[in-house]
Image: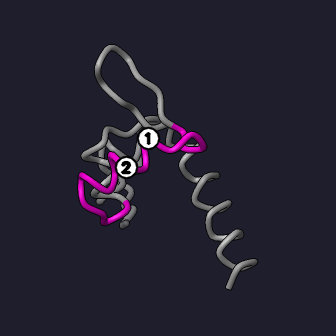
Amino acid sequence: MICSSHGGTIKMKGVSKMEKRSTLTIEELSKELNISRPTALKLTKRSDFPVFKIGRRKLIWREGLEEWLKKQAEEEKEVG
């Protein structure tokens, strides 16, 4: 990410709309975690995963995802 200042305003290059939103779609989740779409769908079926539905659309809460990933990493350390 590169920041540049022009006339008193700061513009950030490399910041996408996806990074600004508080939710992710299944497709965005798969891209962000570098996993396949079917694997992302499997994650959303876990009871401890931060997903919710609006109609038929599944959305992932970004802050909850970060917490979930930290928890998974901690559990992996304990087992490993």
Quarter occupied by residue 69: bottom right
- In the picture, the quarter occupied by the N terminus is bottom left
Amino acid type assigned to the residue bearing label 2 in the image: Lys
Q: Is residue 20 magenta?
A: no
- In the picture, the quarter occupied by the C terminus is bottom right
Q: Nearer the viewer, residue 67 or 76?
A: 76
State the mark number for residue 45: 1
**Which residue in the protein does label 2 denote?**
42
The residue lying at 71 percent from left, 70 percent from top is 74
Q: Is residue 47 magenta?
A: yes
Mark 2 vs 1: CB contact within 8 A = yes
Specify few, some or many for label 1: CA neighbours under 10 Å numbering under 14, 14-19, or 20 or more: few
Please provide percent x and percent y for residue 39.
32, 56
SS class, disc 1: loop
Above or below, 62 against 37 in this view is above
Is 46 left, or right, of 17 in this rendering? right
The residue lying at 30 percent from left, 63 percent from top is 35
Judged from this view, the residue extending furthest toward the top is: 55
* Start-end of magenta stretch: 33-50
